[in-house]
Amino acid sequence: EVQLVESGGGLVKPGGSLRLSCAASGFTFRDRNMNWVRQAPGKGLEWVSSISSSATDIYYADSVKGRFTISRDNAKSSLYLQMNSLRAEDTAVYYCVRDHNSAYWGQGTLVAVSS
Amino acid sequence: DVEMTQSPLSLPVTLGQPASISCRSSQSLVQSDGNPYLNWFQQRPGQSPRRLIYKVSNRDSGVPDRFSGSGSGTDFTLKISRVEAEDAGVYYCMQAQQWPLTFGGGTKVEIK
């Protein structure tokens, strides 16, 4: 069974940093592209970033480019999102999603940016 | 960027009646080796999104056959043949044809 379990969310002040993690199981992680998608409270879905299976191709939404960094550790079957210079508008549930065709989603981790 | 526009924003439906959601892309979604990467998701309150349809018209495992997807080019449709109470939620289309990946704004299906 495919499982994606996010962690690392929490309350942070504007300008602060957080590192999200996603622990994957039930499939061969090193063979799959991975993504982060977020959802602000009461709002729709917004793609944040994607990373190819070998981390050779990386993409970011313009809204996070230069502030967020996606990475992965295939030996640990883990995906990461380093978030710096956080803003109030980054407040959202962040989902770890397998493949750009998005068949599998984690339960999400809430990031709240507030003073 | 490919903009995805869904309509309607809200869709009240009577149990047992059909429902239809439209999704339009700002650019034609073309895939040389088959259907484009146009997917549909259902999000029930308090839950993560669940993919229902992939590549325009392919139902995911476990998705009831009352759900169907169709379309081509820039116009795509999700249909529910007979709405059941468990179908209440927000539905999103998404294009995975090119980066940035983009979602429609969502359609809230409410049971009357």
Image (cartoon, helix red, strand yellow):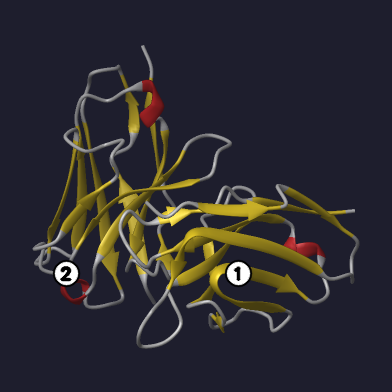
**Residue appearing at x 81%, y 63% in the figure:** B85
Going by the picture, which residue comes out furthest to the bottom?
B33
Q: Is the residue marked by circle 1 packed among few (<14), some (14-19), or many (20+) residues within 10 Å?
A: many
Amino acid under label 1? Phe
Closer mark to the observer between disc 1 and disc 2: 1
**Residue appearing at x 20%, y 49% in the figure:** A80
Please provide percent x and percent y for residue B110.
Answer: 80, 52
Secondary element at tag 1: strand
Amino acid under label 2? Ser
Please provide percent x and percent y for residue B17.
Answer: 89, 70
Q: Numbered disc 2: what chain?
A: A
**Residue appearing at x 24%, y 68% in the figure:** A33
Quarter of the image where the C terminus of chain A is located: top left
Please provide percent x and percent y for residue A1.
Answer: 39, 77
Q: Is residue B39 above or below residue A42?
A: below
Name the foreground residue: A2 vs B35: B35
Q: Is residue A77 above or below residue A36?
A: below
Going by the picture, which residue comes out furthest to the top?
A115
Q: Numbered disc 1: what chain?
A: B
Q: Quadrant of residue A61?
A: top left
Q: Quadrant of residue A29?
A: bottom left
Q: Which mark is residue A53?
A: 2
Residue position for label 1: B76
Q: Is residue A13 left or right of residue B35?
A: left
Q: Is residue A66 left or right of residue B11?
A: left
**Residue appearing at x 26%, y 59% in the figure:** A23
Kindly indicate whether the residue at mark 2 contacts the one at mark 1 (C-beta within 8 angstroms).
Answer: no
